[in-house]
């Protein structure tokens, strides 16, 4: 049956490509190609103009791809000596036809980012280039130091996102520990019209199962308005994903995406106080709730031939329902002319509360001090502010300087359930919250920075700067749930350092940029992970385990944007004397942090080509590797799959088949990673099987809106994501990926 379904898929592909080729003679007057990605040549005017007028008009009409993340100011992407990926609104809408996980979207579209996890997890260990990331929403930090939960991308509905800017590699201009890079989520912007409305709705289902709960639903409504005095956006989104099923039609165990309800709200207002002053206020709310009637069937462990976990239906009633709730409040102020400088100020508040689905360890023969039934929690709050001043230095240089401050409070009590009540009734009553999954602690961070750039000529630009970082840590006394004896003593510590960055950009012609850069990153290790494996006698103040890591990153690259061809190519190498990798604790089986020298390196590339007005094709390539010297003996061992993933390749072909009708195929390939060297840092899983998936989308203009459909995993490939394969021999926890799926969606603006 599986072989037949593959042949059906290939037949569909062949017939559709044939139809697309036959219809390619129909061309739109305006090609459906992003203006930010491609500038079309203008037709010859009928009236006569001078050459100077023509050149000036061409310059005025040439689109700019403006980014803010790399420099904290608005710059053309070709003027930044760093690797940057911009995911625009069109990309997001296309990906939403297959999944609603922002982590999966980044994994498919960003070179250097971890492969799609098939969950809502951030991939905190190897998020970008094998190192952790920092996530921002409109510049507000979203990444708790204790991000072992992978919660910092489970913070906003993608429906409410305008674009995502991803800075690959560490940045000395930002704090918050992003030694792998920065993911800056920019929320929906107001319309330029006086008032407008947006509405979308969709239905998704599995095509490999006929169970009643295979359907999911989504809907979004938004209103936007603007005039000379100000502007605003109000949008609400809701979606539910019920059961998911693999290529064989079997129910997929919980993966953080299936059996969930999500509610998002974005409220955004801006006031133009004067011609030079603006005040803005944004509130973002997001709730992601799990309602599954299924749990993991641990009896699968007894089957040596099992490849995936099996879902077991249960009757469960929660006292504390599993959910994540995120609040972000952001107040901004801009003055464009204070003694010739532009001032930007920001004050923010973020609160994340997470209760995970229950874990049942009954009957597994674990140590007697282990809780048998429990839920992990996270309560993380951050308040802070940012101040920056952009000062021109003549006509060709500028100086950006300012300060960042934040206070982050984190706690993770374990919710222990009553075993007798659960066994008798299926209800999880919380009877004890005195034990800690991770220690509770506070972090206070202060950063002072100065950054300058100088356009030496029209072709050469140099930039550089420094940042002083100071972090104070305070750990409360705590009782570890999975250690005995449980009691641990807290304490205080303080860290500081100075970071540097420098970049050189050469533009032989306006369409090409060649760059070389050096940037340092500074991060505190995950305090929660670090302290969960320490012995009863441990000194928070002096132990090397908690010392920050400083990463030196070297990068060379090329980026170009011609009328019909755009691309990037970059190679990087980074190293740290005190890396932060994971090893397995032989007592608990949980990963714990190990500090040792570490180095990462890799190559990334993208290419997009528009051979005609009706065809687009291109893709991305990403390869990275990493090693750690755990024994500090000069012998480096390869990092595990938790931090370094295999090669990934993404390819697409898109055809504007008739005016208003577009069809697209996406191919995504993940390679194997099974090195000859059996020594893997930390003894963790380092072998992964390859897989290839094909997705199909079709969209057609219908009335004032657009009707879109997507078929995910067109050839019904049976596989598990790289993230799922890291569970190794814990096969009961490995969730298969969804088989063939179908989604239809209609969106309209008026």
Image (tube, rainbow, N blue to C red):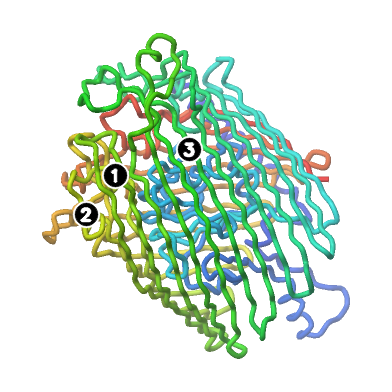
Using the image, tell me which numbered label, if any, was put on residue 736: none
Residue extending furthest toward the bottom: 394
Give the vertical position of 241 relative to 408 (above or below): above
Confirm or deny contact between disc 1 and disc 2 (CB under 8 A).
Answer: no
Of the numbered discs 3 and 1, the one sitting upstream in the chain is 3
Residue 206 falls in which quadrant of the image?
top right
Using the image, tell me which numbered label, if any, was put on residue 673: 1
Q: Residues within 10 Å of mark 2 (few under 14, many from 20)?
A: some
Q: What residue lies at 58% left-to-right and 46% top-to-bottom?
A: 327
Give the vertical position of 25 relative to 602 (above or below): above
The residue closer to the viewer here, 396 or 565, is: 396
The quadrant of the image that shows the C terminus is: top right
Of the numbered discs 3 and 2, the one sitting upstream in the chain is 3
Using the image, tell me which numbered label, if any, was put on residue 354: 3
Alpha-carbon distance for marks 1 and 2?
Answer: 39 Å
Which circle, 1 or 2, is nearer the viewer?
Answer: 2
Residue 532 at x, y percent in the picture: 27, 43
Which circle, 3 or 1, is nearer the viewer?
Answer: 3
Of the numbered discs 1 and 2, the one sitting upstream in the chain is 2
Q: Is 144 situated left or right of 228 in this image?
A: left
Alpha-carbon distance for marks 3 and 2?
Answer: 29 Å
For label 2, the residue is 539
Residue 64 falls in which quadrant of the image?
bottom right
Residue extending furthest toward the top: 424
Q: What residue lies at 67% left-to-right and 38% top-to-bottom?
A: 237
Confirm or deny contact between disc 3 and disc 2 (CB under 8 A).
Answer: no
Residue 34 at x, y percent in the picture: 67, 57
Residue 534 at x, y percent in the picture: 21, 46
């Amino acid at each position: 049956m599986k072989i037949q379904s593959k042949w059906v898929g290939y037949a569909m592909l062949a017939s559709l490509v044939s139809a697309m080729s036959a219809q390619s003679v129909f061309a739109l007057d305006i090609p459906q190609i992003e203006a930010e990605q491609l500038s079309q040549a203008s037709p010859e005017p009928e009236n006569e103009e001078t050459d100077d007028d023509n050149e000036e008009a061409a310059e005025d009409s040439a689109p700019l791809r403006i980014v803010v993340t790399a420099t904290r100011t608005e710059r053309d992407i070709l003027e930044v000596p760093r690797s940057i990926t911009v995911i625009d609104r069109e990309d997001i809408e296309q990906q939403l036809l297959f999944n609603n996980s922002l982590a999966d979207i980044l994994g498919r579209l960003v070179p250097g980012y971890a492969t799609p996890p098939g969950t809502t997890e951030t991939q905190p260990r190897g998020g970008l280039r094998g190192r952790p990331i920092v996530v921002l929403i409109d510049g507000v930090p979203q990444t708790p130091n204790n991000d072992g939960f992978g919660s910092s991308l489970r913070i906003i509905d993608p429906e409410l996102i305008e674009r995502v800017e991803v800075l690959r590699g560490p940045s000395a201009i930002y704090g918050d520990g992003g030694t792998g890079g920065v993911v800056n989520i920019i929320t929906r912007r107001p319309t330029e019209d006086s008032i407008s409305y947006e509405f979308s709705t969709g239905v998704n289902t599995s095509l490999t199962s006929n169970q009643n709960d295979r359907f999911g639903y989504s809907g979004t409504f938004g209103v936007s308005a603007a005039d000379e005095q100000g502007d605003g956006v109000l949008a609400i989104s809701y979606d539910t994903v019920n059961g998911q099923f693999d290529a064989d039609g079997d129910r997929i165990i919980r993966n953080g995406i299936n059996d969930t309800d999500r509610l998002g709200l974005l409220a955004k207002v801006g006031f133009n106080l004067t011609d030079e002053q603006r005040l803005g206020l944004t509130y973002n709310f997001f709730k992601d709730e799990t309602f599954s009637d299924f749990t993991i069937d641990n009896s699968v462990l007894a089957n040596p031939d099992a490849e995936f976990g099996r879902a077991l239906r249960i009757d469960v009633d929660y006292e504390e329902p599993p959910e994540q709730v995120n609040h972000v409040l952001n107040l901004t102020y801009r003055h464009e002319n204070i003694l010739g400088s532009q001032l930007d100020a920001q004050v923010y508040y973020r609160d994340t509360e997470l209760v995970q689905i229950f874990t049942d360890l009954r009957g597994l023969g674990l140590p007697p001090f282990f809780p048998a039934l429990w839920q992990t929690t996270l309560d993380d709050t951050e308040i802070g502010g940012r101040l920056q001043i952009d000062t021109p230095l003549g006509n060709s240089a500028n100086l950006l300087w300012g300060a960042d401050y934040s206070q982050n409070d984190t706690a993770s009590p374990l919710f222990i359930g009553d075993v007798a009540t659960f066994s008798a009734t299926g209800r999880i009553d919380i009877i004890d919250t005195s034990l800690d999954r991770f220690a509770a602690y506070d972090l206070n961070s202060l950063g002072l920075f100065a950054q300058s750039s100088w356009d030496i000529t029209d072709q050469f630009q140099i930039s550089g700067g420094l940042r002083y970082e100071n972090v104070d840590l305070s750990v409360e006394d705590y009782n570890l749930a999975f250690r005995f004896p449980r009691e641990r003593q807290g304490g205080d510590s303080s860290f500081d350092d100075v970071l540097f960055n420098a970049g050189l950009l050469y533009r032989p012609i306006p369409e090409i940029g060649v760059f070389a850069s050096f940037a340092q990153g500074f991060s505190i290790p995950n305090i929660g992970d670090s302290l969960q494996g320490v012995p009863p006698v441990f000194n928070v103040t002096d132990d090397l385990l908690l010392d920050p890591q400083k990463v030196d990153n070297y990068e060379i690259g090329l980026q170009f944007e011609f009328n019909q061809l755009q691309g990037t190519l970059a190679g990087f190498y980074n190293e740290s004397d005190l890396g932060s990798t994971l090893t397995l604790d032989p007592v608990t089986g949980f990963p714990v942090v190990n500090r040792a020298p570490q180095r990462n390196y890799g190559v990334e590339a993208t290419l997009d080509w528009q051979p005609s007005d009706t065809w687009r094709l291109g893709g991305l390539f990403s390869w990275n590797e990493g090693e750690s010297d755990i024994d500090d003996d000069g012998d480096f061992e390869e990092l595990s799959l938790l931090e370094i993933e295999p090669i990934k390749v993404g390819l697409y072909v898109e055809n504007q088949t008739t005016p208003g009708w577009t069809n697209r195929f996406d191919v995504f390939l993940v390679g194997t990673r099974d090195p000859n060297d059996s020594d893997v840092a930390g003894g963790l899983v380092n072998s992964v099987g390859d897989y290839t998936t094909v997705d199909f989308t079709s969209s057609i203009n219908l009335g004032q809106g657009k009707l879109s459909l997507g078929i995910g995993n067109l050839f019904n490939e049976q596989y598990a994501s790289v993230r799922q394969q890291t569970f190794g021999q814990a096969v009961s926890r490995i969730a298969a990926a969804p088989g063939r799926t179908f989604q239809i969606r209609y969106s309209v603006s008026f």
